[in-house]
Image (cartoon, rainbow, N blue to C red):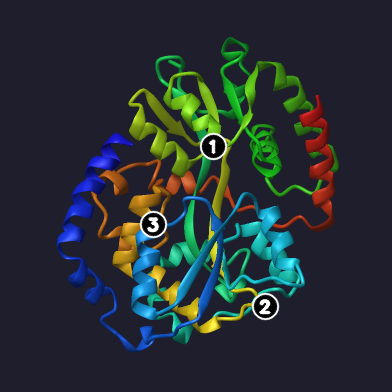
Amino acid sequence: MKKIALFLAAVMLAVSLSATAFAEEIFANGDQYDKIGGELNVLNWGEYIDPELIQLFEEETGVKVNYIEMLSNEEMLIKLASPDCVYDLCFPSDYIIEKLIASDMLLPLDYDKIPNAKNIAQEQLALTGTFDPGNKYSLPYMWGTVGILYNTELVTEPVTSWKILWDEKYAGQIWMYDSVRDSIGVTLKMLGYDLNTRNADEVAEARDALIAQKPLTKGYGTDNTRASMVNGKGALCVIYSGDAFCCIDENDSLAYAVPEEGSNVWYDNVIIPKTAKNVEAAHAFINFLNDANIAARNTEYICYSTPNAAAMDLLDEYYTGSETYNPPAEVLERCEVFHDLGEFTEVFNDAWTKIKAA
């Protein structure tokens, strides 16, 4: 990421020259970060935190952080449901949090131990409150949209509709996202339906549309699609906004759009499982992550959007001025949050099995 790398190099140099001052500012309140000790087992997505921040937290609290990576929300569910679950903190997505709450698997957050929660933007809390009423069990960590990353040298027309993913002139150059909710979701929006539909006929229509589209696709992928787009090997790609922001930084010919039919606005929140062993350290780590300086540094490292309003005030215009990183209100107004579909999830899963087998 050439531009981000240059910017971060300057930031890291400044931080390295004043590491002590940086730590003193973060831990100025002292008492909430008394030496807690013990271990904190964190389950999170890969490359989803600045590792130097983990080291800083360990040095100030005496807590040994064990950072374990997960590949999917479904993997996380299995781990949290295990009778020998060892995790104290986890970062699941919106609809999974809704499922965890319904299954009574989460510990209510003690906000007296998270004073930095005040830094999170109220409009973000309003959206996360749709799947966690009152944000009783979770706080937003990172967020973004799902849209289309496209190569402007190969796609010269305006990208305003999901229908472009079915355009035969881009045959063999279209990447779909290897996720049941994301790929079926964008197809439902193209067809004019709700992302969270519980209508089996609508899901079947989306299934058939994706099966018909499959000969046009380059494939279904996740992380591998980013390199393909950066290297000019694809024309169109369904992608998360954070990944799109990173790709655009690598290749100036790339652009990102959230189609007019609407899309998903997603959240990865931090939660404490009921089975957590080091609840004190878990709350301290959540509070640490929501410090304005820490949150700003973390989002610069990850490139995903922060819900922390105080951190946004510290960011360079390279981030805040980007509609990919910081989408305007009119984009968010046409986006929906994913919700847990309960038993209807099987209808989606059955459709997905048929799509992948086609």
Q: Which quarter of the figure is the N terminus placed in?
A: top left
Q: Report the side of 75 relative to 253 (left or right).
A: right
Structural crowding at the residue carrying mark 1, measured as other residues with C-alpha within 10 Å and reported as few (<14), some (14–19) or many (≥20) = few
Q: Amino acid at mark 1?
A: Asp
- Badges 3 and 2: C-beta atoms under 8 Å apart? no
Residue occupied by mark 3: 50
- Structural distance between the alpha carbons of marks 3 and 2: 26 Å
Q: Residue furthest top?
A: 169
Which of the labelled discs sits on residue 255, or is there none?
A: none
Looking at the rendered structure, the secondary structure element under dot 2 is loop
- Image coordinates of residue 39 in percent, x first then y, are 52, 76
Tell me the amino acid under the disc marked 3: Asp
Q: Residue at x 57, y 40 (%)?
A: 262
Q: Is residue 304 above or below residue 180?
A: below
User: Relative to 155, does residue 209 appear above or below in the rendering?
Assistant: below
Q: Which mark is residue 275?
A: 2
**Residue 128 or 350: which is nearer the viewer?**
350
Q: Residue at x 29, y 84 (%)?
A: 29
Type of amino acid under label 2: Thr
Q: Residue at x 35, y 31 (%)?
A: 250
Foreground residue among 349 and 329: 349
Indicate the quadrant where residue 161 lies.
top right
- Distance (Cα) linking label 1 and label 3: 19 Å
| Label 2 crowd bin: few (<14), some (14–19), many (20+), radius 10 Å | some
From the top left corner, tell me how far across and down residue 325 is, in percent. 39, 45
Q: Which secondary structure lies at badge 3?
A: loop
Q: Nearer the viewer, residue 200 or 214?
A: 214
Provide the residue designation for mark 1: 223
Secondary structure of the residue carrying numbered label 1: helix
